[in-house]
Image (cartoon, rainbow, N blue to C red):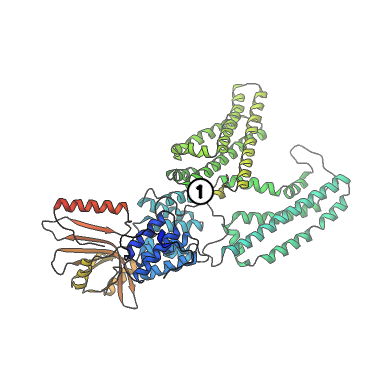
Amino acid sequence: MVSGPDEPDPASVPAPADPGSPREWCVAAVAWLDRDRPEAALEAARQAIDRDSGAGSAADWGYRLASLAFERLGRDAEAVAAAEEAVRLAPGSWTARLRLGAALRRVPGRWRESSAQAARAARYAPEEPDPHVLVGDLALLRGEHRRAETAYRAALRIMDDHPGARINLGLALLRWRRPLGHHDPAWPIDPRETGRARHAVELWSRQVRALLAVALAAVVAVAFGTGLTSEAAIGGAAVPPAVLVITLRQGRRVRLWPYVPRMLARDPWLAVSVVAAVVTVAAYTVAVAALPREVLPLTPGSPPGGWWAWPAGLVLLNGAILLVLRMPVEAWRGRPVRALAEFAAAHRDRTARRNITVTLWLVAGRAWSALAALALAVALLDEPRPALAALAVPAALVWTRARGGLARCLDQVLAADRWLVTARALLLAASVSLAGTAAVAFCGLPATMGEWAWWTGTAALAALVAVFAVRSARAWWRGVPGPWRSSLIMCESCGHRLPGDAEAPVGLSAEIRRAFTYARGVVLAYADPTGPRALAVGAVSSIGPGGELRLIAADDAWEAAERDPRVAVFVADPMERRFWAEVRGIAIGDTETDVLRVTPKQVVVAEYPGRHQGRHRARRQGRRPGRDQGRDHDRDQGREDRHGRGRVPGGE
């Protein structure tokens, strides 16, 4: 029995048409989940489980719905327990495997188990999109972007409008990394432990670099301000022991030293931070040891102080250097135009619109870095003609709008972020101004006009930096998504459709149960390396309450089920020979009872050829209760009325 302290008033749960039917209570739980009421859904799922005695036709469905409700309530351990019970009751159910995989992904250290369950769900139901999406999500969380792309594209081939596959495919194309990028979800440790280790390493790097920058600034001020060069050098030499103290202090906080090298490999910027600290220590040592007696005069092509200024500048400006290095690298990673096309395809979802905004800021960062490089090249080469390439930026923005599919949502996105409108306007102004610098040179106009155009373009680029800084500061202050890559988020349970693990199981009607019980001509069809095969089964050993068929089959069938568990079981009506039935499902070998357990996925029932030839009825797992089933029933009922015949027995 599933229970919990946060139980809603039973009167708030919609009363099923048949209060004694566990399936009716499951339908009510699905309705509550669709309304985002997990407390009420949990109560309805408990009612279904209690009325099914733990082994009935809707037991695994009830446990799956309870697991989904627990997950939405943040009770991950209980969600896993309920999902494991669903798998125990229906080991061949792809929905139960999918639910268990989704629940395990939230538990630290159980990523491999989650991946195994997702792979099984995809193997059991390759025609369903949700197992492929879960496989892609798990790969994306681990940074396996190509594998994630493959899985999401497989899901979209099945369901083109799947919002989760669309949005997360865009993240894979952007080479997105989750905030805990240093942690491999496959590691058997809590990510909070690696998070503390990462914080200690990063704090050590910051403290060392900041200490040495302040110390060298003081040394330079004393040496060049008072002329006490020797004393300043001696004082500077006393700083490295303080670095050792910081290292020992932060080193004691790192309790996972065996994982640190792997953390550095997974988080490139953490590795860069560590390398920067080591380089800063070396540069500080050189700068203090080679401290000049006086400031050397400025000569063309060399900085003040000669070569000594290079290590000194590296120490004093290490933070700014890392920032300048990181911004263009982050902006130029991934394929934002293709990602925008995927986000735009799901633009009705809030997550998609948020990711569109962030991606447009990344595109603006790319354009800014290209224009800044052009402006710098013009200044260094004293040749304005290359600046004509700045006109490529407006063309690239237009191309991004067209190829990114933004025509239907760009106005809505820009209306929500006016700072982005300003940034795009500044990019256009900088592009035109820098191109004007080249136009002045080509037309032979006065050089002063070209200089003014260059300064105008440079000022526009500087203004764009200010806009980005203000937009970032406002986002940080208000606690809302900012214009940086870390604001990109995955789609989890987004959209207006319930996940596949909430779908109803397929049952067997009384007529089909009777046919399997009394028939002596049951046939098992399966895949073989040489092609499809059919094997006569003397009889079905038993039929589970949920419709599971238990077959006694030869070794060939067991081996085939291990290769491909998708099978079909055929039976004819043994009494009146009115119909035949095909049960397509998943076969799992049970070594304890020495039977093949076939969990139904689809039931097809048809009459023997004759005056009713061609009439058939199919029931697929995954048909949701509600309006869709009502329409199917009405269509079937209308067809029966037109033929003037009664109902053909089929699945429940």
In the rendered view of the protein, which quadrant contains the C terminus? bottom left
Numbered label tally: 1
Res 182 visible: yes
In the depicted structure, whether residue 325 falls above or below residue 74:
above
Q: Tag 1: Cα neighbours inside 10 Å, few (<14), some, or many (≥20)?
A: many
Relative side of 228 to 496, left or right: right
Rendered residue at 79%/52% (across/down):
215
Seen from the viewer's position, the closer of residues 91 and 175 is: 91
Residue to which mark 1 is pinned = 174
Rendered residue at 16%/55% (across/down):
614
Res 529 visible: no
Q: Residue 407 location, x and y as percent?
A: 44, 36
Question: Which residue is the extreme one toward the front?
Answer: 11
In the depicted structure, whether residue 54 falls above or below residue 15:
below
In the rendered view of the protein, which quadrant contains the N terminus? bottom left
Seen from the viewer's position, the closer of residues 129 and 628 is: 628
Image quarter of residue 620: bottom left
Q: Residue 49 location, x and y as percent?
A: 37, 68
Q: Residue 187 location, x and y as percent?
A: 54, 65
Question: Which residue is the extreme one toward the left?
Answer: 611
Q: Mark 1: which amino acid?
A: Leu
Q: Residue 579 location, x and y as percent?
A: 16, 63
Label 1 secondary element? loop
Rendered residue at 39%/62% (across/down):
44
Relative side of 73 to 265, left or right: left
Relative side of 96 to 638, left or right: right
Seen from the viewer's position, the closer of residues 316 and 76 is: 76
